[in-house]
Structures are given as structure tokens and as C-alpha cells.
Amino acid sequence: MLRLSKVNKYYRVGTHSLHVLRDLDIDVADGEFVAIMGSSGSGKSTLLNILGILDDYDSGEYWLGDTLIRSLSESKAAHYRNRFIGFVFQSFNLLPFKTALENVALPLYYQGVTRRKRNVIAGEYLERVGLRDWADHTPAEMSGGQKQRVAIARALIGKPRLILADEPTGALDSETSQQIMSLLREIHETGITMLVVTHDPEVAARTDRLIRLKDGKVVDPNETAEAAASHPNLPVAVPERSLTAPAIPATAVAAEGRRRSMDEP
Amino acid sequence: MFSLDRWQEVFDTLRRNKLRTVLTAISVAWGILVMVVLLGLGRGLDNGLRFNFRREASNSIWMSAAKTSIPFQGYDVGRHLTFENRDFERAKAVAGVDHISGQYFIKGGQFGGGEMTIRHGVKANTFGVNAVHPDAIYLGATEMVAGRFLDAPDVALKRKSAVIGKPVARFLFGDDDPIGQWVDVASVPFQVVGVFGDEGGEEQERQIYIPVTTAQLAFNGSDRLGMLSITVGDADSVQAKAITKEIVAQLAERHQFSPDDPQAVRVHDNVEQYERFSKLFWIISFFVVIIGLGTLAAGVVGVSNIMMIAVKERTKEIGVRKALGATPWSIVMMITQEAVFLTGLAGLLGLSAGVGFLSLLDAANVSEFVKDPGIDLRVGIAATLGLIFAGALAGYFPARAAARVNPIHALRDQ
């Protein structure tokens, strides 16, 4: 399904560069349900961005199916994102001014599906996540769990081959988290490959395989999710925001870039 | 390209940000309003200028004999001057004189022939009588509606021809054809050869023209002329002044008055006046256009600014759209279309409001110097196209910024 071989990613900060992903090799087979864990700065956000074709990498290869994802043009990347990948985010990222139905239908809009047709399809997907009756509500009128269901319906509607979920339960209470994980599991059982980035060992425990990242490398590819969940000495999940060290280096790069360009004559 | 769906998106966005939309629209509409009103006023001023010069050709110079004010060659001041037919002939030869007419004031005095009784059958009334040369037709805003004006044989043969104004014809002949009929001018019979109208209005039409030589013969005029009138073609005011000066010098030599006497010949120089007014109005129009364009530019910059802020506000939304497969092009089009639509609509509103204001102004008739203010269709179309272009420009830069939004940053930014 997807294969990363010897992928390297650097962020340039001033004169030195930060080596975020180091010769990363990851193989995910068709229909797998994989969790990616790692502390802040382990490179998992970067990995997610690369997998989601939201960011490029410096060397190595990333194959999505039979397609080499490498130095794509913006429009090409947009096209692949639209056709191959469904995103589920921690903060849902629904458009607040659109109804649940319109939110779900949005990827089809970018596929050029007519309004009538995509609304019908969106209705079916809302049905699948049990929110048929909420079609005309805006996100503000919904609970976190409902919002995440809408987001999942939206991720599914483009018939992606891969779902990338970034902390899908990070903003939910534990009961809702369980429900969302069950939903993801159900969807996975229909044959869609699923990658979940998470801090939460309980979430990881409900996947089939765990990939643990540390300093831009996979720690132990053979460790199973069950083992991780039962292991007493798991690294404590630290909220990303509280860390200052090399967190979110991309922002620093952008800021640095701006400052530098202003300094130049 | 301009799909219904994208329109939906545009309307959605505009509706969601009512205050922003309204304020932006006002700034553009106001810019256009000001520009249209100023352009219209400029045109009104121009029309007003033309209207105020409508009675006389704007390239005409009128020289009438008056009283000397400087002692000269033994003559005292206060001597009344009179021109003669020979003065007309000599002035005619001056280079730069396009058309020339002398006028004999039948009743004396300095201004026109004055009113005389005109009779046809039992109908009689007083009308202004002008004894002139054929070129007089070029000096005013006279237009023939029937027959002909006076011609050279009329003058040479001292024919009793008369050209009468429309109201004169209506009064004397009613619905009958006046051409070839006879009228009595102070008991002297003249044959009507033409009927004229005059843009200068009713007063200018309550006149009759007769050949200057005939009048001199019939009304004891000898070869006296009270006034010489010329047109100078395309000459500017400097050239016109030189021509006038030469004619006055000839007259001074012949009639023994000082060529520097400011009062001996009363000169009414339309060229200079027209030029002065045109220049003034041109300057006014120029500033009017500059101010109008400036206001419009401020409006467009305003739109661009607001769109820029809007893009910033919508960073996350744009990030989501990009993650879901929106191409940079579709993002650019979304923002640009919004700007074009907003600018175009507001601009059209401003355009209509401006045109409306101008017609109100026209109806109110505030000043004789502003007449028929308005903008023509071409300006309207150009303004509309300009607006759409300005809108596209106002939208493009923010749109480009939007298309560059990095979904990673946008979505992580909580």
C-alpha cells in the first residue's frame, strides 16, 4: 500500500539544519491498521505531512500504491490528496459555516461532482456514521464526537485508499474516544488502510500494528500494539504544546526565512 | 471557470462577513460615485461653457466704433468714430481673417440696428434689424431652416433681400411659405429670401438680416459702418490679438486716432475669453479626474487590504480545503472571484448612484455654468471594465497569498 524507503527530511534553521527523519523505512500493507507513536520531536508530525502529501522530503522514496510521491506540483499533490487520502484531524477542521452535509460533500466538490449528486452521496456517508438527522446542523451545534464523525464521513467520501488520522481522539473524552475508535475499526474492516498518529496507548492498542518513532527513526518495528499497551514502562504521553525544545520546527523555518529575506538588500 | 458552486461559495463568504462586505462595498461604491460625479461635473462645466458662448462663434472678434480717449494729432478726446466701407475692404485683406462682416447701425448708436417696424399686409411688429455682409452667418449660431442667407450679389447689387428669423416668419406669415414674399422694413419693401433659426434662443431669432449696402442706401447710411466682426479660424488668442491689433492699427491710421487708445475701438474678443475659460475648465476637469481616480484607487486598495485580512482570517479554512484536494488555482479563483464580484457590484451601485445624482443636479439646474452634466456610455463601459480589472487586481495578491497557505501550519494552528 505505502512504502517509505530511506526517507530523509531536514528543516533548515539558520545556518544549521535539523535532521528530522533519518533514513526512515516504513512498509504498510493494503488494509492494515497501524498506529504511529512517538514523543514530541520524534518526527511523527513530519512523517504524517509527508504521508499526506502536505510536505515534501529531501531524499529517499515514498510510494503510495504504484505512484512515486516526489516533488509533485501543487496541483498534482492536491489531486492525489483528493483521490488517495482521507484526513481526520484532532481538531476536526470542519468548516464552521457549512452544514454537516456540506462539510462531508466538500472533497467531492473538488472532484467536480455536481451539487445534487454530492449531496446525495454525502447523505449516505452521514448515514454510515449515524448522523443522518444532523445533516443540516453546523459544527457549532454538534458535540466533539459528532464533529469527529462528520470529519470521518468527509474523509471517506472520496473513496480514499488510505486514511490518515492525526490524534483523532485527542480532543475527546474517553468514552467518545472509544466510540470513534470503534468507528475507525469498522471502517478499517471494509478494507481501507488506516494510519493513526497518537499519543494515547489505548488508541494504539486498538490498532493492529504499532510503529514507534524516536529521533526520526523507527524504534522497533516488531513490537505489537498490544505489547505497547500492556508494557508498564511506556514513555509518558506528553502534551505536545508544553514542550519547547525542537517542537514544530517548520514554523521556525518559516519565521527565519521571512526574517532573512527582509534583511537581504 | 465561473461555476455555480463557486458562486455559492462566494455568496456564503460574503454573507458570513456582512459588516466587512458592506464596508468594502461602500468604499468602492463611494470611489466610483465620486469619480462619476466629478467626471459628470467636468462635462457639465464644459457644456456650460459652450452654452454660454452659444450666441457668438467662439472664434469671433467684434470691433465697434466708439469714442477716443487719447488726444491725437491735434484732435481732442471724446471724438465719436465711425467706420466706412473701405475699412471693411482693408480689414478683409488682413492675413488670418477667416470671415468678416461689417454692420451699419441704421438707428445709430453702438449696439445693433435696434428695433424697427416690420410689416406684411395687416400684420406689423417691431423686430431687430441687422444690416450686414453675407459672412455674418458665420459669426453667430445662425442656421438656415429655409431659403438662403444673404449672398455677395445681394450686397454688390444692393438688392432688397431679407432673411428673417423663425418667430418673425411665424408672426407675419403664419403657416404660409414666406420665401419670395415681401415685407416692409420701415416702409421700404424687402423680399424674403430665407428663414433662420438660432441656437442662441428666441431673442436671437426675433431678428431680420438685410444687405448692408441696401440699408446704407435706403436708410441714409452713406458708406458708414458701426462695427466690424471677424472670425479667425483656428487662431489661438495670441494670433487673434495680433490680427485685432493690425485691424485696429489700420483704422487708427485712417481715422486719425491713437492706435494705443483703449477706448476708440471697443473690442469684444471671444477667442481670448473662450480660451481663458477653456483653460480654467480644463484645469478643473484635470483635477477632477485626478481626484476621482485617486478616490477610486483608494477604494481598490481598500478592497485588496480587506481581502488580505480575510485571507489571514481564513487561513485555516484554506488549509482544510487544500488538505481535501483544493488546487492552488481553485483557491486563487475563489478569492479573486469574490473580490471581482464585490468590486463590480459595489462599483455598479456607485455608478448608478453617481448617474442618479448627476440627473438630479441637472434637474435642479444649480448654475448656468453647469449644463447637462453626465457621463457618456463609453465612459460608463470603460469604468465598468476598469472596475472588474481593479477587482481582479485587488483579489489577485491576497489570493496568491491564500494559495500559498501551508496546510500543515494552518491545520496545526489551533
Image (tube, rainbow, N blue to C red):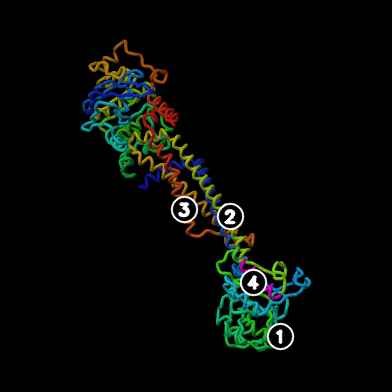
Span highlighted in magenta in the image: B242-255
Are there few (<14), some (14-19), or many (20+) residues within 10 Å of tag 2? few
Say whether mark 4 and mark 3 are on the same chain.
yes
Say what amino acid the circle numbered 1 marks: Asn
Q: Which residue is mark 1?
A: B220
Q: Which residue is mark 4?
A: B247
Residue situated furthest top in the rendering: A232
Q: Given this view, does label 1 or label 3 mark the residue nearer the observer?
A: 1
Q: Could you tell which of marks 2 and 3 lies nearer the N-terminus? A: 2
Q: Which residue is mark 3?
A: B384
In this view of the protein, which residue sits in the foreground, B262 or B125?
B262
Q: Which of the chains bears the disc numbered 1?
A: B
Residue A63: image location, x then y, percent: 23, 29
Residue at image coords 49%, 57%? B379
Quarter of the figure that contains the N terminus of chain A: top left
Residue B81: image location, x then y, percent: 73, 75
Q: Could you tell which of marks 2 and 4 lies nearer the N-terminus? A: 4
Marks 1 and 2 sit apart, C-alpha to C-alpha, by 51 Å
Marks 1 and 3 sit apart, C-alpha to C-alpha, by 67 Å
Q: Given this view, does label 2 or label 4 mark the residue nearer the observer?
A: 4
